[in-house]
Image (cartoon, grey):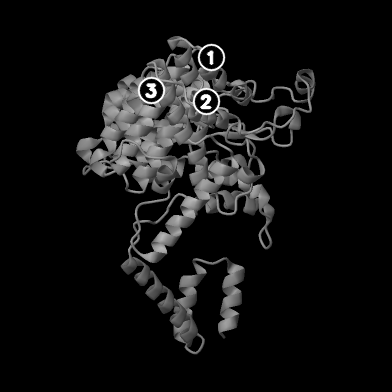
Amino acid sequence: MAFRNSDLSMDAARPAFRLAPGLLVLLTRTQWDSDGQPIVPGGLEVWREILNQKNESKMVHDWARRAPRWDHPEQLLEAMFTFSRMDSDTGPLNMYLTFAELDSHRPAERRLKADTLRVLAKNFDQLSEQYLLFSEFPELDDASIIAFVNTADTLDKVSNHTLRGNAMGTFQAVIGLWQILARQGQIPPEDLNESWQAAVRSFGKVGSSTQLFDAGRNSLTAVVHAASGKIIVSQDELMELLAGPYQADPKGKQIHTEVARGIRSVMDGQRLVSLDTLFGLADGLNQVAKGAVRGTALLSMAGELHEFQMPQPIFTSSERTEWAAGLYNNRHTDLQMQTDLAKVLKGTASHAQLEEARGQLAPFLRDTLVGLNYAYYDPPGAQLLRANPLFVRSHDFSGETVAGVEGLWRAPQLFGQGTPAGGGAHLVGSLADLAFVLSDAEQDFISPENVQALIWREAVPSLLADAIVPRWWDVTNNELHAVTLYQLAGEELLKSSASDQDLRGKVMTILSERMIPHRSSRLERALI
């Protein structure tokens, strides 16, 4: 009865094709105790509170009125069956599925506390797509999760629009680098919580661009130290870290070198300022503030900030307003073009002016850190990052370039494609699920040969993302040898089945479950 819709005035076909995409996932993810009762993340009391959160759904309101009378978990599960008919990405069922997924990777004694789930539920509309990271790393404890949510909430409340965008971008970029290094096993499991909290804690107070630059640098230092044991590394050393852990065998070294070369190629193609230059300038400005003599080396590094050139605008502001309503050129890059540290270094600047000059490096630091994430997740044979050298710089974290966009902490969306007056294609949103988003953008550059276009469009992003995220650095030679033996055994069975009818029947039974009927029939005819 919980799954039955109270509205019976539907057409005849609707009951056969119910709108319930979450139902099968609900049945799959629900965990059961030894008594056959569903295990409720956080307990029933938490879910009574969640259902009473602000929600426009009448269905949720109806179940919220019943919730105080619940006395066993199956009643909550009944409500979730009902919510499976809701067309929502942030409803109670989505919360339940997410929280169940987070707990499924944790031992019983380390399941998330009720207070942690309350915090996650309160911020679910905004941060739900960021929570996937906690599923990938169940080692992160309640304190680490709450620290992330609180920091994201703090950054989201920064009043200055430009500073907020730079802060959100820098924060997410460092977290993205932590995720890469942790996934590759370069951050030891016992150091995951400490390194995570150190990276997040650095952004606890960001009230100016100078504070943001220092926060980004300190956060990156914490991540690099956890992965390499070093306090200071060059950008080349950081790219080597991102390319994967140390490889002893020649083949592993070759692949490692190719991955590092690919990352370096994207960074060079996007004309992003090197971390070495940014940190060198920051240290130099600090020394000048303490009375050191201004050298030509600082002026040379300051000149590197302008090595990228924006294309000459072909539309005036009024033309952009008329022909690209809601879209306009990225103010982020405009401000970078106006940055002139050479003027400060050549003149007589006060301590406050030198501090402000250091803060002008914050947007460049954001771009470089974001660029490292882009470069790592760049799909095989990608064209977008090579065709548009301003693609990384144009990433909009605060919704500055598109009017009315919401969900800025969710996976980014591609805007501006085919709209020159709007400044060209760029991503708007967070760095969540960046591997898939970049792959989704790239699939339009690839033309299918033997597959229907609609199927191709749905399949390509996942295929490209799967070629990036699992780097397989921990696969051993013995495992590769085992895979080779299985492959050879399969080929021998297939060859032998051509002359053995009984064997052929067994082989085709197995293959028919894993091949489309057309190919299966063609293979069987070839074996006869």
Q: Nearer the viewer, mark 2 or mark 3?
A: 2
Q: Residues within 10 Å of mark 2 (few under 14, many from 20)?
A: many
Q: Earlier in the sequence, mark 2 or mark 3?
A: 3
Residue type highlighted by circle 1: Gly
Numbered-mark total: 3
The C terminus lies in quadrant: bottom right
Horizontal arrangement in the rendering, residue 363 relative to residue 314 (left or right): left
Residue drawn at x 19%, y 37% as measured from the top left = 109
The residue that disc 3 covers is: 203
Kindly state the secondary structure of the residue where label 2 is placed: helix
Kindly state the secondary structure of the residue where label 3 is placed: loop
Residue drawn at x 42%, y 19% as measured from the top left = 288
- Mark number, residue 33: none
Horizontal arrangement in the rendering, residue 470 relative to residue 458 (left or right): left
The residue that disc 2 covers is: 363
The quarter of the picture where residue 287 lies is: top left
Q: Nearer the viewer, mark 3 or mark 1?
A: 1
- Mark number, residue 347: 1
